[in-house]
Amino acid sequence: MPYEPYMKELIKKVETTRSARIQAAKEGKHFPRLSEADGMKLMKEFHPDYKEGTKRQLAVGPSKGKVVPNELADILEAKSSLNSGTVDLSRIDYDVDVLVIGGGGAGSAAALVAQEHGARVLIATKLRHGDANTMMAEGGIQAADKPNDSPPIHFLDAIGGGHFSNDPQLVKTLTHDAPSVIQWLEHLGVMFDKDPDGTMRTLHGGGTARKRMHSAGDMTGAEIMRTLRDEVRNRTDIQVIEFAPALELFTDHEGRCAGAILFNFETEKYTVVRAKTTILATGGLGRLHIQGFPTTNHYGATADGLVLAYRAGASLCFLEATQFHPTGVIFPEQNIGLLITEKVRGAGAQLLNADGEQFVYPLETRDVESSAIIRECSERNKGIRTPTGRFGVWLDSPMIEVLKGPGTVARDFPAKYRQFGRHGIDISKEPMLIYPTLHYQNGGITINSQAETEVPNLYAAGEVAGGIHGINRLMGNSLLDITVFGRIAGKSAAEKAKQTQPGEITLQHVQKFHEELKKAGVGDGRISPILLPDYVGKIG
Ligand code: MEZ
């Protein structure tokens, strides 16, 4: 659906202010950036995380007393569909060294490295191999590999982006390993954007002091996922089972993780996997649609790994904070919630209100940027109304054509160019209409720098793990995190498997958790993991 005539009238206001804005940008004059204190103040007023009545304390489990969004608490304080009597645990279908649960970027990287360390590896994935948030990531992956940059500068940016809440040891590992991970990915076949002389092209993301965002057009995640998946599939000794989500972990009599039970979507049968070590790489929670927000996330992002690990005894961290990406599509209606990469702002595009005025520095951290947009559309009443009564602000992509030369938008943002083009909107000539969208699970399962959880023989990597980003992640640190910690988890799990005898598999922790729920008087009737989002009767 192209812009309606009244929207085209409003776009004229954007065009009126464009040449002065471009001139200012060329002179290095920017909209003032907020101080840490002013950013925090803005967030407390407008960021969804601070909205009253949207979170509650967990009543049971290892993180009892911690506050999480209600939608997440609902599935953490819920019963398993299994108990000790449901399945015959004497029949073991697969007996492996390392079980990887999740077939996205983190799971695939983990499987590759575990196999290189001599482990017999099985990947179990809920949908198809590669159906993951990795595939949805657009703009880039951070690594301090240019002469004017360094891992310590990257470290400071990541810590600042997390408002000083991140686990410093995890950030050190993330930023230190980044340059070698880029080399590893390139060696496997990832085609990063380069200048004609072979130099990696890098841009700024929000909250970064150096240009260190490496990209593959606006499909960086898809390119990384394609490469990792191909590599796994080429190593035929790594087994992959698709359409087989994990329903529950197994623990042995010492409380160590001992594998998982899978549910096969196609056959509707259970599969029992005994594993010496297990890696959770199940991704995030976007499809819980926190506070009713649309999401950038893939269809399977239903927080399954958090539920499984929590019942088995792993604590959770930083889940009180959810990331809303500032630039989700708000028009055309068919695409609501889909990601418009931060790389668009990294390339020079600015955010503008209904009067064509800039109201925020374009590369604030995501939580601050989102808060400014929400304020513009609510308190300041300067949002642009869509035909169905939603509000958004303009993202002035045509600026990029002027700043960087004609054809840049189609070349550097081919996916967005085509996506909007299908609706009769040429984003090299007309701005995009955006509003914050639910993007990322900032926190997750507590891990250390070896990717170990608090449950022996259970590891976690990627979006399911917490602590690396604290309460707010910077752009491009997710594709980095899945690769760095996926690789570490693979190595740690394979090495541990060498010293581990397979344990007896039980669901005793589930029974214990059910008793705790009963004692606390919560969770009656709710079953989790939910595996797939429930939209029945909710779309109107
Ligand atoms: O790290 C991300 O979330 C990312 C690359 C998203 C984007 O804006 O492109």
Image (cartoon, helix red, strand yellow):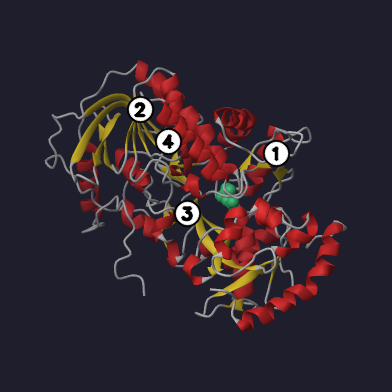
Tell me how far mark 1 sits from mark 3, CA to CA: 39 Å
Whether residue 113 appears in this view of the structure is yes
Dot label at residue 307:
none
- Disc 3 residue lies near ligand 1 with CB under 8 A: no
Tell me: residue 521, above or below residue 479.
below
Say which amino acid is labelled 1: Lys
N-terminal-most mark, 2 or 4: 4
Q: Secondary structure at mark 4?
A: helix
Residue located beneath label 3 in the image: 320
Tell me: residue 35, above or below residue 122.
below
Nearest to viewer (mark 1 / mark 2): 1
Is the C-beta separation of discs 1 and 3 under 8 Å?
A: no
Q: Residue at x 46, y 25 (%)?
A: 113
N-terminal-most mark, 1 or 2: 1
Tell me: residue 501, above or below residue 84.
above
Q: Are there few (<14), some (14-19), or many (20+) residues within 10 Å of tag 3?
A: many
Tell me how far mark 1 sits from mark 2, CA to CA: 41 Å
